Structure formats: C-alpha cells, structure tokens
Amino acid sequence: MNEPIETKEPGSGMSGGHALDLKLPIGWLISAYGVLLTGYGLLTGKEMYAISLGINLNLIWGILMILIGGGFLLAVLVKKRRTKS
Amino acid sequence: MAPVITLNVIDYAIIGGYILVMILVGYSLKKYMKTGEDFFLSGRSLPGWITGLAFLSANLGALEVIGMVANSAKYGIATVHFYWVGAVLAMVFLGVFMMPFYYGSRVRTVPEYLKLRYNEATRGLNAISFAIMTILMSGISLYAMALLFNKMLGWSFHASILFAALVVLLYVFWGGLSSSIYNEVIQFFLIWLGLLPIVFLGLKQVGGFAGLTAKLHQELLHSVKYLGTSNNPLGVDWFGVAMGLGFVLAFGYWTTDFLVVQRALASKNLNSARMTPIIASFPKMLVPIIVVIPGLVALLVLPEFAPAALPTADYNSALILLMKHYLPNGLLGLAITALLASFMSGMAGNVTAFNTIWTYDIYGSYIRRGRPDAHYVKVGKWATVIGVLASVGTAYIALGFKNLMDYMQLIFSFFNAPLFATFLLGMFWKGATAWGGFWGLLAGILAAAVHYILYKTGTLSYHSEMAANFYQAWWAWLTDFLVTIGVSLFTQKRDPKELVGLVFGLTPKPKAEARWYARPAVWGTLAVGLSALLYVLFW
C-alpha cells in the first residue's frame, strides 16, 4: 500500500483498456425505445391520449428519446474517428 | 383482486428489451473479468461520469423513489432536506476530504481501511455487520418489487422474486461490479425518462408551479420556515434535521457505506475517485423535480388523496396511481421498466458489495488467507450465487415488516451512524487508538439498540417515527464519538509512521493536482453554493 497512485496509467486496469463503452448500450437502448414509442404514437388514435391531457406524448417522447439515444451513439462514433486519425 | 394497471404488448416489449440488454451487457463484460480487481473493483478503470452516476443511482432505488414521492405528499417541500442538507454536503465532504485516504491507501473495501487504521477486531465487527446489512437490504428490494408488481400488475409474487433474482445473478456472475455499475447508469437515464412525463403533465394540469403554490397549504410549501419547533408536517425540529439527518445519517451513509464508496474506488485515478461523489451531487440536487412535484400533484389531482380521503390514504401508492392517471400504454411500459431497473440495480448493488466484503474481509482474512488471485475470483462468483439465494430468503423475512422505509432508516441508524464517528476520528485525529476504534464502534451500535428499546417501550417519545430515527442516529454517533476518545486516552497509541496515508495531517498532499477547472475543491464549493441557493429559493 501507499504506493504513489499518480504513477498508475489511466485505464491500466481491466486488462489494458476500458472494457466496453457504456455509451453504446445506453445509446442503443434509448434510441430503440424512441423508435418503438414514435411508431406506436403514429399508429395510435387520439382517444388513447385522453388521460395524457390530449397530448400524444408517445410520439413527442419517442422523438426526444431518438435524439438522446442518437446523441450517445454519435459520441461513440466521433470518439472512434478521433482515435483512428 | 384486479390489477390496478393493465399493460399491453408494447409495454411488455419495452420491459423485455431492458432485460435483454442487461443480460447482453453482463455477458459481454465476462471476458474482461480476469483478476480479482477486475471483478470486485472494475479494474479501477472507470471514468468519473460513469462512477459518478452509478454513485448516485446506487441510492436512487425504486423504494427510495416511491418512498420519497410518498414523503412529498405527506410532508411537502420539506422532503428536499433528504437531498440538499441530507446528501450534498456529505458527498462533497467525501470527495474533497476523505477520498484521498480511501483511494490513496489502495484499500479494496471499507473494512480493510478500518483494519489498517485501527485493528483486525474493528474490521471484523464492521465486515460482518455490513455483510448482514447488504443481504437484508437486497432482500428488501426483491420483496418490495414483487409486492408492487403483484398488486399493481397482477404478476405472480413468487415468480417475480425468482425471475428478478435470476437476471441479477446472471449479470453479476458474469460481469461483477462492472455489470452492477453499468446497470446503475442505464437506470439513471431510465428513471428520468420514465418519470419526467408525469412531472410535465402534472404541472400542466394544475397550472404550473404557481398553480401548485396557490392551491396547497402553506406548511407544505416551505422547507425551513416551520422548523422552529417540531410542530410541522415532518414532526422534527431544526436540530433533528440538521444533526440527525444532515450530519449523522447523511454523512454516515454517504461516506462510510461500502455500497456507495465501492463505486468511487472503481475510478481510474485519484482525481476521478474524488470527483465521483461531487459529480453525483449535481443530479442529486435535481432529484426533487421527479419526486417532490409528483407528490404535491398527487394531492391535487388524485381522488385517493382528496382532503377527506387523506387520513386513510396509502401514500406509498401515490407514484403508481399517478402513472395510471397520466401515462398511456407505451410510456407506461417505460415508467414500469424504470422501476424494475431500479429494483434490480438496488439488489445488484448490494450483492456486489456483499461478494466483495465476503471474499476480501471475511473469507480471505479469516478462512483461507494467501491463496492465488484466481481462487478469490472463483470465491467471489460463488459468493454472488449465495448472496442472491440468501436475498431470496431475506425477501420472505421482509414480508413480516409493515413499513419498509422506516425499517431501512432503522438499519442505517444502527450501523452507519456510529461508523461515521469511527471514521471521522480515524481520518482526522491521529490520537485515536486501535482499541478506541473498536470499543467506540461497539458502544455506538449498542447505544442505537438501547435507544430503540427505550423508544419501543414508550420511555422515549417523539412526534414521528422519522424524528425517532434521526435522534437515534444522533445518540449512536455521539456515543461512538465520546467512547472512542475516552478509550483512546487510556490505551496505547499507534506509531505515527504506520499511519501515513491513512490520517489527515500525517499524509503529504497529492502533488499532481488537476487544473483548477477539474479540481474537486472547486466543484465541491460550487455544489454546496448551489444547494444553499436552492434553500434560499424554497425557504
């Protein structure tokens, strides 16, 4: 113990690198949910949304989730490009 | 009895998708689990944002969310004390002052620190009581989940328990702490995405925040104004809130509970470890948006919470009834998935804390010492299986308790509250001796027990169950604090050379500090300032 920890390289654990980029499963899950909700929102009629004060919230929330999920996937893509070049 | 909520195929697709992703994540982490440090501490390799969000989510379990919505309907805006005074300060303190000793000493667990700072007996006492506590807590998550899904969705109670236990077992067995942390981060996003629609629709219906304040009783709308006496909805005065909750319970939980500290220890370097709780404190400040607002909205829109119905209202059902009130199928599935995710991650967090403490502090210290690393990984995996099976058992014990939130606070006031005194003295007073630490901790736990008996037999009385818990925490802490000092004055001091890296004042400051904008102290100050500002706004 008491070894100076600053000497440890970032990510030197876990067999040399950060194992699985968590942004991938988060991005896929949220955007898949987004697509599902958007599609369902497009297919369902107005009467279903009486409880949500007449707002087709499946559609709105679905689109929002596609954007958020897509943002995570984009971040992974940008990072990959950068490490390649 | 007919279920309260009816799901359709789209809702089940959303729930199924989550379970599938969790199992896949666990499976794909399997190949990275080579050493003990990989399995128990994620190879100390994770970036600050992941450990920070996991640190927060480990405490944002479904019971917490459902319980805090219930508290908000009962106590109003005063519920923010659990977040602002009751968490942010302690999280910042952990990051700025305590993390250098936890991470810097390279210990793998909280009890291991106690062994280095005090002695083997102190570690044993803490390791065993903590192991019991994690299994009880994990059982509570499992029980509460099965109960909720049985009552609300009509799922089979026993099948829900077995199925959730199996999923958690699979992904923790494969991916260890990493699986648990990844699930917590995914859960963090699901909780916000799942519950925000209720907040929007609720505010829209009651006419925005202004509409809420115009229609509700004044006592429900202030956090501090009515704390002068214990004659407020909370039933606790300012001293109980500040010392019991803000100081002892919050610091005890956030700074010494291995379940949360373990997340920071998984960080890739000291700076990330220190930033972990500080990053977590910012979203923590905002959690009242998804718990307090729904709680207040429930009072105005749900017939079950109309003034005439209040005396018999089941506050814990507020969140579920709001879901039914506002969410169409689709979003409903998303909200149920968010709850399912937080139940499972609450359980997984406890199981991973258990397998680590069992393997390092109990098995590796008292049963089989000095075996090769691979042996301990195997033991950790089996401990996971046993931990999950034991949780199924304790889930059926939890069946016997009526109010789970009070039961949880009670467990914390027994084990975490005194432990914080032991840590405070250990880290900041070099005069605390080995046996001072042990007897102080034991005396603190016993003081909690004595207080509990006096309260239950009616010798002591408080305005509410919550007040009793706050004061129990305070007395347990004070007893530990005084006994540790008292015994330390008469027992043999440790050689200061042995305490380098463990005690403040004997440890050189870390040299390679990050640039000013990445420094824990800067962000910590900002977090404390912001929560003070929030108090001014919601006085």
Image (tube, rainbow, N blue to C red):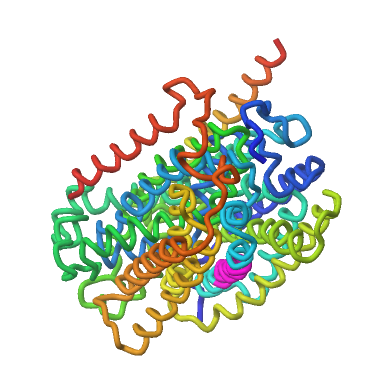
Of B277 and B311, which appears nearest the observer? B277
User: Would residue B511 be found to the left or right of residue B163 on screen?
Assistant: left
User: Would residue B103 be found to the left or right of residue B282 on screen?
Assistant: right
Residue drawn 64% across and 47% down? B107
Q: Position of residue B29 (x, y in %)?
A: 75, 43
Of B534 and A41, which appears nearest the observer? B534
Residue B133 falls within the magenta-colored stretch: yes
Q: Which residues are magenta?
A: B128-143
Camera sees residue B252:
yes
Of B302 and B405, which appears nearest the observer? B405
Can you say whether B229 is above or below B183 in the image? below
Can you say whether B153 is above or below B57 in the image? below
Q: Position of residue B26 (x, y in %)?
A: 73, 48
Q: Quadrant of residue B325?
A: bottom left
Q: Quadrant of residue B236?
A: bottom left
| Most common SS among magenta residues | helix
Q: Position of residue B368 (x, y in %)?
A: 82, 62
State the residue lying farthest toward the bottom.
Answer: B457
Of A80 and B83, which appears nearest the observer? B83
